[in-house]
């Protein structure tokens, strides 16, 4: 909160006074010390009864404090609770409090339940690559927790039950079934409880656990778990579904009992979906008649007792169950299982009848869209052609299903005006939500795949009638809106994220645009038919690939004019369409290197009105932060490139004003991300043209960035650090650091900044940028703190990648004389980490770093450091770590050259490898790998990062990398233009020192790798080298 931030010291000033003692290079821990600490902690896990009561009371007081209206009390309690979760036994203590029978303190128990769930979420999975945040849950505590959770969920109040249910699901995601084999039998047993509240809770929990079977790749492990699950639950599930169905009849006039039964049926239907998602199990195939009989009964079920006639928004229990059943039918239909085909005709009729009976009210939206998608999945398959091939059937679908669900409802108009954000999210392409209109268009496209001529003719007649109706009376604009949507449905044959790639030959898209869309966009009166204008903009967006560059340029003034619409939806769609057009490539070009249809040249004449229109929206404080508009600003700046330089000051002022507003209440992360991307674009555009301008940009950016740091806005600090790094990377080395950057460096090493995971990638890059400019100058007073950061990062699986990036920056930018006293300790830390977690990922990064060290410092230095730790350890690393890595996971892309250079120097500067048979075996293996890497078709001495094309830019909850601030990959061995020549000449030197040895090793040692033998010969011939 603002008050909290005001009570803390500003980062820019407070940070400058911090000491870096908390981030230091620690001496290596002795194993006996670790063992003693662990044993000491274990003795404290089971406190006496008196101590337990004291701890319980203390915990209760802390939880009460977290609910305090006083900010200081609440903050202190939250910090205490955060620290407590890292102490051994805390999770079990929290569970005891939840299980206490203190009915007067249900709120405290509920707060404890939320806290417990969060502990489990973060700390249960010890193998989580993101770490456990220091949470300790001992094995005895884990066993105790699991043995009581199910029973606790069944007996706890409902508000606590939900949290415990989620905790069970989280633990099951890690332990089920291998380490929690009594979970499912216990759940199945509780399914027989006479208390329907308990049954419903159990079923919801089971549903949550089994969701993991959906949307995952098939594997033997997955099928083993599913088979285990089916063995225990398939029969009890069917029996409970059937008995619940009988209870539905018995309690037909009891709304309370009936609702519980429908809740149970809904959960069981979702469990059915999960268990059948991967494959149709044998039991379900054998009992398909029972399941389908029950499903068909509920698709036509009606009971006014469960329907609130006044409710318009929330679906009834019947609606929810019917939606789940239709999803199950769609799943079975998608599998084309022969056993389901006899039921398909009846279910199609049932869903059809259900669909046409539903109201236009929002409470039926989900059931309608699910049912339409079910019909779409059938219509588009040739297998089911006989169900829909009659023209009368197709006409009925268009008339009774498609058109009614394309019609604008009163609720749509209300959302358009009163809740534009929600309207946009459900209607814009690519959104997660499915609207009735989107599903109806998709149904038309499915119909066209099998019955294109008939569907096109039927819809074209409706389009003509509706447009004539609008022409006769323009107040009937809803008819024109439906007509456009019908055209959008029948015109598209193929479409991707980049636009429509193939259209229906029977539809003249451009003629329709000229006659009916273009006049709508030309209408300068924003008050006229704003919903139709939105649909017209959607038409342009959909068919942007079909427009030529000239047509798009002629459209640009009309699109820009709609940025001035007072309707949030209209000006948002205008911004969205412009942004997508700027991303549109020329489809006539080759698949690689496509040119944008609107380039810097085409956009330049529109920059002033475009930015004026966009910033008028962002400047309007009455409007919410609009991420579509800010994304359009970002894309426009990126397309404009150097052309934006003359108005850099003006644009920065606008972006700074927007930043100042969102600093007060950061509520839209996507908007904020595009805002910082826009700043990064400006930095790139200006500095890539003239790096000497970096000082002026710093003068513009430092004040708003200082505000972010002073207010400690944690959402924004990673962005600030990335752009500061970007500025430093553009800063000419001759300019030095300057006073502002120098003052900031020491605070950047503060432990508190590195505790926030979202800061780490940006901080690593920022420190690297500092070191590149003034490595020795900064290392002299701060080397222990700088290396201490490496030690902290490398200890965590979540951050080991950044630990290696940080260590690489140190190695490349700090002189050997400064580093020498610490290299043995650095290698010890790496080897200890290797011993504690030898994952392929870590081994890959470790050997890559070793290759860098050897390439920069030489092979003798590498062996010297290694053997100072323990004699012979260097050879062990080569044999047991490096060679196996090259066999299983050879380096790729940018890593290849660094690895090759390191291997070359290892081979050519290490005579010890040739002194005995063991060394020679390692030598010849490394020799073969090096030759294969150098002769691979993909290898290039000046390898650059692969072009991944246009990457979709957006916010990420963990760390949002700014694409336009991304650092260009650098070659640490740019001075080596031809590694293959260095390789050949190095082998020549080795061979000359021991004549006859090397050719013999190649001939006999690589007999099983003729490719490597041929590669060595070719590389030597290329460099004019002959091995003696």
Image (cartoon, rainbow, N blue to C red):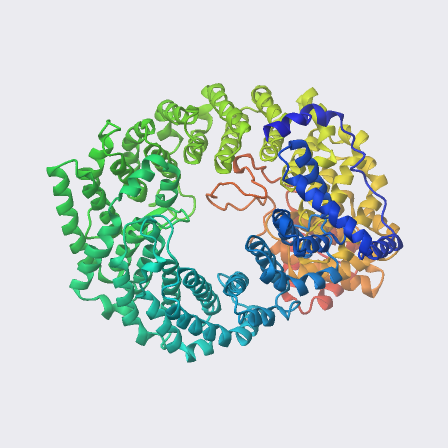
Judge from the rendering whether residue 249 lies leftward or rightward of residue 650; answer left or right.
left
Total label count?
Answer: 0
Say which quarter of the image contains residue 1007. bottom right
Judge from the rendering whether residue 305 lies leftward or rightward of residue 526; answer left or right.
right
Residue 259 visible in image: yes
Judge from the rendering whether residue 721 lies leftward or rightward of residue 473; answer left or right.
right
In the picture shown, does residue 722 fall above or below 923? above
Judge from the rendering whether residue 718 lies leftward or rightward of residue 347; answer left or right.
right
Give whichever of 867, 41 is nearer the camera.
41
In the picture shown, does residue 221 fall above or below 40? below
Quadrant showing the C terminus: bottom right
Say which quarter of the image contains residue 817. top right
Give whichever of 294, 408 is nearer the camera.
294
Q: Measuring from the top left, give residue 350's x and y in whole percent.
A: 28, 66
Q: Measuring from the top left, give residue 839's x and y in whole percent.
A: 69, 58
Quadrant showing the N terminus: top right
Q: Measuring from the top left, give residue 269's x and y in whole percent.
A: 43, 66
Say which quarter of the image contains residue 921. bottom right
Residue 81 visible in image: no
Residue drawn at point x = 38 percent, y = 39 percent: 580
Give whichever of 992, 157 is nearer the camera.
157
Q: Measuring from the top left, give residue 359's x and y in whole percent.
A: 27, 53
Residue at the extreme left of the image, as rendered: 472
Residue drawn at point x = 29 percent, y = 39 percent: 413
Give whichever of 203, 176 is nearer the camera.
203
């Amino acid at each position: 909160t603002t008050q909290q931030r005001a009570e803390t010291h500003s980062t820019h000033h407070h940070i400058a006074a911090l000491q870096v003692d908390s981030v230091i290079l620690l001496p290596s821990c002795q194993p006996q010390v670790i063992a003693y600490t662990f044993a000491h902690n274990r003795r404290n896990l089971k406190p006496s009864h008196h101590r337990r009561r004291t701890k319980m009371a203390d915990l209760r007081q802390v939880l009460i404090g977290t609910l305090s209206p006083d900010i200081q009390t609440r903050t202190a309690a939250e910090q205490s609770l955060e620290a407590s979760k890292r102490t051994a036994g805390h999770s079990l203590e929290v569970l005891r409090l939840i299980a206490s029978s203190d009915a007067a303190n249900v709120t405290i128990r509920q707060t404890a339940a939320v806290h417990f769930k969060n502990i489990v979420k973060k700390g249960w999975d010890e193998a989580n690559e993101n770490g456990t945040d220091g949470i300790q849950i001992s094995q005895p505590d884990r066993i105790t927790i699991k043995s009581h959770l199910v029973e606790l969920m069944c007996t706890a109040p409902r508000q606590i039950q939900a949290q415990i249910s989620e905790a069970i699901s989280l633990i099951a995601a890690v332990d089920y079934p291998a380490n929690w084999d009594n979970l499912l039998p216990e759940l199945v047993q509780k399914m027989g409880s006479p208390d329907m509240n308990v049954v419903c809770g159990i079923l919801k929990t089971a549903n949550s656990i089994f969701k993991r079977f959906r949307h995952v790749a098939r594997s033997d492990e997955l099928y083993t778990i599913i088979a285990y699950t089916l063995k225990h639950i398939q029969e009890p599930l069917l029996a409970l579904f059937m008995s619940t169905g009988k209870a539905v009849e018995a309690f037909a006039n009891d709304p309370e009992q009936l609702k519980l039964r429908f809740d149970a049926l809904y959960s069981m239907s979702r469990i059915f979906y999960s268990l059948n998602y991967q494959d149709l199990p044998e039991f379900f195939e054998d009992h398909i008649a029972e399941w389908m009989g029950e499903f068909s009964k509920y698709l036509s079920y009606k009971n006014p007792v469960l329907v609130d006639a006044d409710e318009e928004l929330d679906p009834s229990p019947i609606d929810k169950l019917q939606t789940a059943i239709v999803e199950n039918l769609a799943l079975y239909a998608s599998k084309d299982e022969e056993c389901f085909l006899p039921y398909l005709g009846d279910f199609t009729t049932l869903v059809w009848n259900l669909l046409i009976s539903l109201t236009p009210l929002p409470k039926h939206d989900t059931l309608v869209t699910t049912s339409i998608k079910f019909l779409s999945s059938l219509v588009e398959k040739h297998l089911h052609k006989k169900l829909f091939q009659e023209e009368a059937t197709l006409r009925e679908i268009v008339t009774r299903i498609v058109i009614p669900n394309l019609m604008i409802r009163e609720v749509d108009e209300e959302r358009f005006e009163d809740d534009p954000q929600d309207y946009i999210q459900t209607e814009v392409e690519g959104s997660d939500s499915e609207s009735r209109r989107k599903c109806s268009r998709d149904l038309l496209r499915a119909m066209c795949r099998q019955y294109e001529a008939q569907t096109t003719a039927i819809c074209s007649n409706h389009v003509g009638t509706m447009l004539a109706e609008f022409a006769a009376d323009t107040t009937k604009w809803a008819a024109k809106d439906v007509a456009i949507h019908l055209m959008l449905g029948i015109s598209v044959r193929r479409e991707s994220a980049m636009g429509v790639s193939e259209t229906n030959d029977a539809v003249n898209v451009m003629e329709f645009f000229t006659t009916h869309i273009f006049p709508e966009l030309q209408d300068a009166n924003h008050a006229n038919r704003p919903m139709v204008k939105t649909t017209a903009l959607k038409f342009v967006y959909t068919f942007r690939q079909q427009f030529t560059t000239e047509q798009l340029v002629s459209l640009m003034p009309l699109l820009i004019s709609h940025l001035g619409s007072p309707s949030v939806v209209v000006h948002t769609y205008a911004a969205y369409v412009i942004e997508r057009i700027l991303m549109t490539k020329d489809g006539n070009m080759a698949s690689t290197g496509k040119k944008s249809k609107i380039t810097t040249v085409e956009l330049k004449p529109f920059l002033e009105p475009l930015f004026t229109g966009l910033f008028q929206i962002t400047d309007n404080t009455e409007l919410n932060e609009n991420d579509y508009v800010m994304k359009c600003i970002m894309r426009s700046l990126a397309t404009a490139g150097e052309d934006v330089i003359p108005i850099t000051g003006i644009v920065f002022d606008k972006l700074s004003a927007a930043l100042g507003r969102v600093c007060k209440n950061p509520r839209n992360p996507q908007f904020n991300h595009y805002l910082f991307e826009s700043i990064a674009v400006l930095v790139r555009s200006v500095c890539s043209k003239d790096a000497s301008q970096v000082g002026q940009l710093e003068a513009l950016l430092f004040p708003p960035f200082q505000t972010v740091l002073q207010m400690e806005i944690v959402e924004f600090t990673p962005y600030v650090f990335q752009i500061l790094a970007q500025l430093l990377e553009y800063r000419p080395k001759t300019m030095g650091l300057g006073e502002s950057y120098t003052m900031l460096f020491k605070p950047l090493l503060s432990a508190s900044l590195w505790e926030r995971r979202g800061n780490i990638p940006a901080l690593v890059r920022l420190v690297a940028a500092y070191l590149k400019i003034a490595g020795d100058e900064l290392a002299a007073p701060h080397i222990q703190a700088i290396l201490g950061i490496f030690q902290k990062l490398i200890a965590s699986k979540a951050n080991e990648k950044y630990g290696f990036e940080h260590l690489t920056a140190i190695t490349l930018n700090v002189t050997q004389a400064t580093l020498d006293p610490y290299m043995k300790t650095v290698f010890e830390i790496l080897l200890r980490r290797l011993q504690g977690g030898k994952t392929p990922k870590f081994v890959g990064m470790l050997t890559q770093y070793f290759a860098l060290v050897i390439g920069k410092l030489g092979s003798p230095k590498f062996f010297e450091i290694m053997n100072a730790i323990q004699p012979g350890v260097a050879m062990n690393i080569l044999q047991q770590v490096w060679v196996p890595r090259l066999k299983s996971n050879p380096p790729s892309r940018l890593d290849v050259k660094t690895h090759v250079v390191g291997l070359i120097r290892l081979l050519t500067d290490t005579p010890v490898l040739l002194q005995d048979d063991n060394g020679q075996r390692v030598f010849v293996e490394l020799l073969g790998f090096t030759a294969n890497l150098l002769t691979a078709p993909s290898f290039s001495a000046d390898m650059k990062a692969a072009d991944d094309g246009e990457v979709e830019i957006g916010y990420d909850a963990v760390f949002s990398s700014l694409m336009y601030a991304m650092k260009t990959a650098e070659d640490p061995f740019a001075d080596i233009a031809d590694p293959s020549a260095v390789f050949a000449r190095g082998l020549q030197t080795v061979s000359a020192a021991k004549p006859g040895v090397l050719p013999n090793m190649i001939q006999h040692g690589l007999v099983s790798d003729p490719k490597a033998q041929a590669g060595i010969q070719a590389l030597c011939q290329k460099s004019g080298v002959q091995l003696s």
